[in-house]
Image (cartoon, helix red, strand yellow):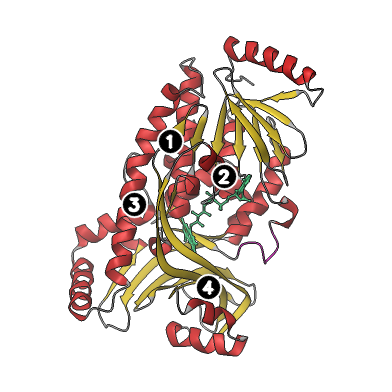
Amino acid sequence: MGGACGAKELSGVRAMTAKAKRNSQEPWIEVDVLVTGGGLAGGTLSLALAQNGFRVATVDLENPAEWTDRGFDGRASAIALSSQRVLHGVGIWDVIEHETAPIKEIRVADGHSPLYLHYDHAELATPGQAAEPFGFMVENRSIRKALNVLVPKTPNLTYYAPNVMVALERTAEGAFATLKDGTRIKAALVAVCEGRKSPTRDQAGIKITKWDYKQAGIVCTVEHERPHDFCAQEHFLPSGPFAILPLPGTAEKPGCRSSIVWTERADLWPLMMELDDDEFLEELRLRFGDFLGEVQVVGPRFAYPLSLQFAERYTDDRLVLVADSAHGMHPIAGQGLNMGLRDVAALAEVLVDARLAGQDIGSQAALEPYARWRRFDNALMLAVTDALVKLFSNGNEPLQVARDIGMAVVDKLPNVKRFFMRHAMGTVGDLPKLMRGETL
Ligand SMILES: Cc1cc2nc3c(=O)[nH]c(=O)nc-3n(C[C@H](O)[C@H](O)[C@H](O)COP(=O)(O)OP(=O)(O)OC[C@H]3O[C@@H](n4cnc5c(N)ncnc54)[C@H](O)[C@@H]3O)c2cc1C
């Protein structure tokens, strides 16, 4: 497999090997890309790069054996069709497909208003071709489970987990990282995928703009009497959106399981989390309604405080920010991971192109196309999600009337509706190759 390091890095290795001997420490393990944070985005990036001939070392704080515990991360993500193509491209989809549910319809309602917006994937069907779903519901644990299956089988890729980088020196010759267990890794580039609280980003001096929504997303799984028919529902309530998202269900009761993302105000969500199971169910029922019959909460509940954050820049010498380390958004439109996977697909493509052009993949020149490509797109999505939060987490009566009329109008305009539906599929804009279902 071809690597990305040229003669410049080789001389750097020699220099650092001498230093290593001086310190009588571990020898330097040389790779092309060091990925810090091997979760949803970092894991997908690691696979995409290794499958395209880069030597990759990935470090994660957590023990992968615990990733699939029910208590690790209760989220299920709505991923757009374009994101599904990325997961398919790196092999994750084949492992998890049977655990996913397609999203065939989307219904958006403003509280208990009779006016609503309804999208049906069948409206995008073309003659002779079955309509594709808007996207899929995937439990985050499923993606992590797939990483545990795929990583050991992938040549060029090594996970160091649980582990953490304790020192990083970035020079013209390379990025020199020391892990907690003493492992020393020399890379041409460090791809930072550590999620929102990224120490490597902070240590690189990259500032973030951040504001708190004073809300949390309460997440849990429910079983219900009647099947959801693969319809994702979002109800805008005064405290914030309440989403009911279709999961696959069980063999006995197919389509009778959903993931809940219940946005609640900062002064109320801790109280909701403290309720006993019966009280919690009662509160949930008030918001859920009875359109799917009897409902029961299954498994643990989680609360994620919600904020917006955006890094002032995405690159530095031999360093690049990816996914939540670069941007964090409100889950109102279910776009955080989708944008993260766009970053992954774009970065993998930019690095393959840089290698072909004989560039040093850690140089600012090689990374600049990624920053240009992704920063604007992410900023736009942050602005859209922020506007939606302000528009819909608001009990102001004239505003409520205006947004209800707006939704009803969009519902009656087929071209506008089709535009929004394609956006939901993530198939518009300047898509990276992996998102178009192409190879790099
Ligand atoms: C309530 C809620 C609902 C959501 N729903 C959706 C949805 O429907 N659709 C959607 O697209 N998005 C959704 N999102 C957003 C989505 O969950 C995130 O965008 C996504 O998890 C980001 O992935 P990531 O890999 O960047 O970060 P993370 O998932 O946070 O993973 C970071 C990884 O880095 C590791 N790590 C952290 N620090 C270090 C370190 N110092 N060194 C090494 N490793 C480290 C962690 O162990 C972890 O494995 C939702 C978010 C919330 C809060």
Q: First in sequence: mark 1 or mark 2?
A: 2
Q: First in sequence: mark 4 or mark 3?
A: 4
Q: In the image, what residue type sits under mark 1?
A: Lys
* Residue ID for mark 2: 199
Of residues 93 and 348, the one nearer the viewer is: 348
- Residue 18 horizontal/vertical position (percent): 74, 14
Give the magenta-colored segment's residue range: 68-73
Q: Nearer the observer, disc 2 or disc 4? A: 2
Of residues 138 and 172, the one nearer the viewer is: 172
Task: For residue 204, say whether it is visible.
Answer: yes
Q: In the image, what residue type sits under mark 2?
A: Pro
Q: First in sequence: mark 2 or mark 4?
A: 2
Crowd band around label 4 with a 10 angstrom C-alpha radius: few (<14), some (14–19), many (20+): many
Q: Nearer the observer, disc 1 or disc 2? A: 2
* Residue ID for mark 1: 433
* Residue ID for mark 4: 258
- Residue 423 horizontal/vertical position (percent): 32, 53
CA separation, marks 1 and 2? 30 Å
Report if residue 296 lies within the magenta region.
Answer: no
* Residue ID for mark 3: 381
Of residues 191 and 199, the one nearer the viewer is: 199
Q: Quadrant of the N terminus?
A: top right
Instruction: Determine the image quadrant of residue 22.
Output: top right
Q: Tag on residue 367? A: none
